[in-house]
Image (cartoon, helix red, strand yellow):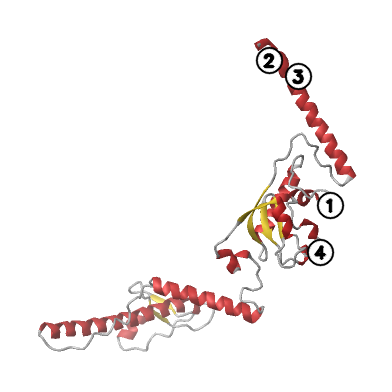
Amino acid sequence: MSWFKEMAGGEPMPPYVEADGSSNPKVNDPTIPNRMVSTKPANRPFLAHKEYRDKQDALHAEWLKKKKERDEKVARGEEVEPLEPDPTAVHEVGLLGLFKFIVYVILIFLLAGKFITGSFVWEHESRWLQLKTYLPKNERLFSERMLAQFDGSDPSKPIYLAIDGDVYDVTKGKAYQPGGSYHILAGVDAARAFATGCFKDHRTHDLRGLSDAELKSIEHWKSFYRDHKDYFKVGRVSHRPIDPSSPILEHCDPKKAEKQRQEHAEREKVATAASEKTRPGQREEL
């Protein structure tokens, strides 16, 4: 009944003391009438937000009052000054604002990369960061004889190589220059050599007899040249048809060559058995 004693003129109530002994006076709960809430640190963000909202409501009410007075003057035909914008209005971010934000983020990213790594693109190498990727491409069709002219023997011409029919300019690669470790691949479609590693013996586009793993290796190399930052596609090479009766090139590794012969013999055996199995049925039909 201490509150009744205070109303009768007695001494005020002592401040609220938390159970842990700290002194945090209570204030009215902003959301629930006739309820007190402590000003302990856990409640302060909530109370600060309510204080902010009260200030915003007061500013908005003052602006509404000014707007009403201005509207009344306009109705009476009096000259009025432009109405100030509502200080509490929420401004939507339009397309222009979003565009500016993206531009600022990109600029900060580029400048940070130049400051930290010395490269605007953070030393990231990709064909998508090269201007040539977005320029119109003037690709051409090569014959095998024409492709051979771009093997690096003529310093006035670029160096080209082909892989599975696609021709790439590899002039910037030192390894493809005369005397380089991969110069043997220049001026020719050596797709088979990329799969087997037999650079001297398999400088051909003939892919017959390759395993699935070797064919996947060719796809890997095609992606390597297609996505490289320094190499770019310049056209296609037209190959002469491969005679299916011609012998398949053996692997340069004797062990792999022996395995290749065994696999070929096994396939021939299966094909022969299948052929003999269908002959009696064919005779019956005849």
| Mark 4 or mark 3, earlier in chain | 4
Residue 282, label in figure: 2
Neighbor class of circle 2 (other Cα within 10 Å; few <14, some 14-19, many 20+) is few
Instruction: Name the residue beneath numbered marker 1.
Output: 200
Residue 276, label in figure: 3
Q: Is residue 169 left or right of residue 40?
A: right
| Mark 3 or mark 2, earlier in chain | 3
Within the image, what quadrant is residue 244 found in? top right
Q: Secondary structure at mark 2?
A: helix
Instruction: Name the residue beneath numbered marker 4.
Output: 180
Q: Secondary structure at mark 4?
A: loop
In the image, residue 274 lies at what x, y percent?
Answer: 74, 23
Query: Which amino acid, mark 4?
Result: Gly
Within the image, what quadrant is residue 15 found in? bottom left
Identify which residue, 183 or 93, lies in the foreground.
183
In the image, residue 61 lies at what x, y percent?
Answer: 26, 81
| Mark 3 or mark 1, earlier in chain | 1
Identify which residue, 32 or 75, lies in the foreground.
75
| Mark 2 or mark 1, earlier in chain | 1
Identify which residue, 58 or 33, lies in the foreground.
58
In the image, residue 219 lies at what x, y percent?
Answer: 69, 50
Q: Is residue 162 visible?
A: no
Q: Relative to 42, does residue 10 appear above or below in the rendering?
A: below
Comparing marks 2 and 1, which lies closer to the viewer?
1
Q: Secondary structure at mark 3?
A: helix
What residue is shown at x 76% (from left), y 49% (from top)? 195
Query: Which amino acid, mark 1?
Result: Lys
